[in-house]
C-alpha cells in the first residue's frame, strides 16, 4: 500500500471512531444517500431527528475559492445550538498535515458556517503545530476546540 493509501486508511479509522462516539450518544446519520452538495440542506431541515449528523458535507468555498467538504457536521448538541463541524486530522508519522493547519484555521475563521472542532491524533504531528492551533481558539471565534480522540470522547458525553 502506498503512503497516501495508508494515510487515508488511518484517517478513516479516526473518522469511524468519531462516528462510533456520535452513534453511542444517539446521533442519527442523515443524508448519506444524497450527493455531498445536498447534505447540508437536508441536515439543517431534518428537524424530525433532533440529534443528527452528516459526513463529508459541502459547506461552501474556501479561502482559495475551492469547494470545502467537512468530515462531520452535527446538529443537536445542547452546548452548540447552531451545529458543529468536526474535522479529523490523523498523522502517524512526520509529514505535511501539520503544515496545513494554518490553511484549515483560516478556512474555519472565514468560510465555515458554524463553529468547528478539530480532532488531531496519531502521534506524528509536530507538538508545536498542535499547540499553535490550540492557541488559535482564543483568536478564532469559529474554532471551538482542538482535541485528541480521548479528549473528544470525554467532551462528547
Image (cartoon, rainbow, N blue to C red):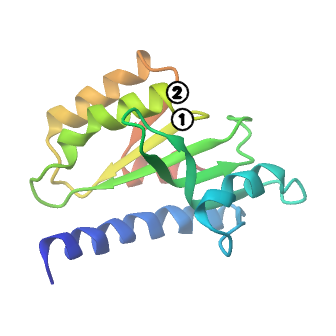
Q: CB under 8 Å between callouts 2 and 1?
A: yes
Left or right of 28, for residue 137: left
Residue extending furthest right? 48
Q: Nearer the viewer, residue 140 or 23?
A: 140
Q: Name the residue under label 2.
A: 142
The secondary element bearing badge 1 is classed as: loop
In the rendered image, the quadrant that contains the N terminus is: bottom left
Residue in the image at 54% along x and 66% along y: 19
Residue in the image at 35% along x and 37% along y: 104
Residue in the image at 84% along x and 60% along y: 49
Q: Residue 112 carries which label?
A: 1
x, y percent for residue 54: 63, 60
Residue extending furthest front? 65
Quick one: label 2 or label 1, which is nearer the N terminus? 1
**Could you say which quadrant of the image residue 84 lies in?**
top right
Residue in the image at 46% along x and 26% along y: 109
Q: Which of 66 and 147 is in front in this view?
A: 66
Q: In this view, does 98 lie above or below 18?
A: above
x, y percent for residue 85: 55, 45
Amino acid at each position: 500500500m502506498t503512503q497516501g493509501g495508508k494515510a487515508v486508511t488511518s484517517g478513516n479509522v479516526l473518522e469511524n471512531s468519531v462516528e462510533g462516539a456520535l452513534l453511542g450518544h444517539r446521533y442519527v446519520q442523515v443524508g448519506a444517500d444524497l450527493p455531498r452538495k445536498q447534505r447540508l440542506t437536508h441536515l439543517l431541515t431534518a428537524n424530525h431527528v433532533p440529534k443528527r449528523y452528516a459526513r463529508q458535507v459541502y459547506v461552501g468555498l474556501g479561502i482559495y475559492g475551492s469547494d470545502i467538504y467537512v468530515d462531520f457536521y452535527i446538529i443537536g448538541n445542547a452546548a452548540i445550538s447552531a451545529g458543529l463541524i468536526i474535522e479529523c486530522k490523523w498523522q502517524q508519522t512526520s509529514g505535511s498535515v501539520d503544515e496545513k493547519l494554518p490553511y484549515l484555521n483560516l478556512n474555519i475563521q472565514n468560510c465555515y458556517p458554524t463553529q468547528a472542532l478539530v480532532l488531531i491524533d496519531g502521534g506524528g504531528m509536530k507538538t508545536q503545530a498542535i499547540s499553535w492551533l490550540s492557541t488559535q481558539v482564543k483568536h478564532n471565534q469559529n474554532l471551538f476546540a482542538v482535541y485528541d480522540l480521548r479528549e473528544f470522547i470525554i467532551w462528547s458525553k
